[in-house]
Image (cartoon, rainbow, N blue to C red):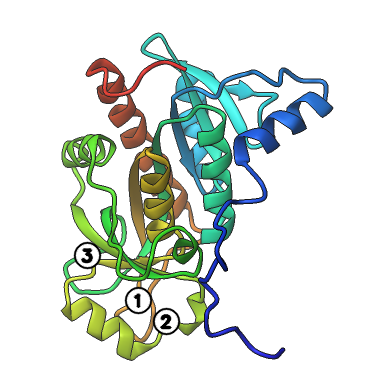
Amino acid sequence: MTGSPSDWLNHYGDATPVIDPEWHMRELAGRGGGDAQAQCPALVMGGFIDPMTDPIAEATGAVDSDLKPNLRIGNLNGHRVGVANVPVGAAHATTLLEELIGLGARTFLIAGATGALKPGIDVGDYVIATSGLREEGTSYHYRPPDHPARADGQASRALIEAARNSGRASHPGCVWSTDAPYRESAGKVQRYGEQGVLSVDMEASALMIVAEFRGADLGLILTVSDLVYRRDWPNIFGTDEYRANCADMAGIVVRAARALLAGKDTTDG
């Protein structure tokens, strides 16, 4: 057999997964001498790099946990909360989401970065991803191709409100997610921008689909790090400005979490 099978989404009569994420994580915890019944906090804040997660951990006093190597546990408004380092890429990011949901997480506020597809969205602005254009491969194993990717619940609304009060421009809307950052062609960038897609990343649509599939509430805020619509590709990756923008965004995530906890839209784990 060569290439990809034409019916690669066919489960051949039995769609039962061989590996259950909750069972797997609890088995690992028990093997490692930890508490196999331990619960992840219901509310988890996360980010893809340390400049996004470290300020959240500092604000919540989060410390390493036995549940996952990349999960810290802290306290906010009298509630246990999680702080997760989210791996880059749709497959890895959704694997973490699956495992944390299996351990009890129900609400996620995740910070990331994105490239603007159209003028009017500038470096340092925020994009709150409320829907997604699915060009990653992971989400198709959860929902059929015509299923919309959305994140428009309480978590997203809390981020929109917190970002609105930040003093920076924020843009709720659709994000294009792709597994191939070096294949973001000029033609696609122009077409998607004209269709109203705000920006591009690697994880948003997959996270949306998996969260919805598992009954979790996802909010995703992205700092604009680069301008993909320009051929000279202005970007601030690796700069002090980028790190400062990530820290500011972490503050928005914490404010959104406080609002959710105060409004009892999530429960303590």
Q: Residues within 10 Å of mark 3 (few under 14, many from 20)?
A: many
What is the number of the mark on residue 187? none
Q: To which quarter of the image does residue 35 belong?
A: top right
- For label 1, the residue is 228
Q: Residue 247 in the image: x percent, y percent?
A: 42, 40
Q: Residues within 10 Å of mark 2 (few under 14, many from 20)?
A: few
Q: Which quarter of the image is occupied by the N terminus?
A: bottom right
Earlier residue among tags 2 and 3: 3
> The disc labelled 2 sits on which kind of residue?
Glu
Whole-angstrom CA distance, mark 2 to mark 1, is 9 Å
* Residues at marks 2 and 1 touching, judged by CB atoms closer than 8 Å: yes
Per the image, label 3 sits on a secondary structure element best described as loop
What is the number of the mark on residue 121? 3
Whole-angstrom CA distance, mark 1 to mark 3, is 11 Å
Front: mark 2 or 1:
2
Per the image, label 2 sits on a secondary structure element best described as loop
Q: Residue 107 in the image: x percent, y percent?
A: 38, 32
Left or right relative to 5: residue 152:
left
At horizontal 83% and vertical 28% (from top left) the residue drawn is 31
Earlier residue among tags 1 and 3: 3
Q: Is residue 264 above or below residue 219?
A: above
Q: Is residue 209 above or below residue 7?
A: above
What is the number of the mark on residue 184? 2
Q: Residue 87 in the image: x percent, y percent?
A: 58, 51
In front of the other: 8 or 107: 8
At horizontal 27% and vertical 74% (from top left) the residue drawn is 117
Q: In this view, does 31 lie above or below 11?
A: above
Residue 222 appears in the picture as rendered: yes
At horizontal 66% and vertical 34% (from top left) the residue drawn is 23
Q: How crowded is mark 1: few (under 14 residues within 10 Å), some or many (20 or more)?
A: many
> The disc labelled 3 sits on which kind of residue?
Ile
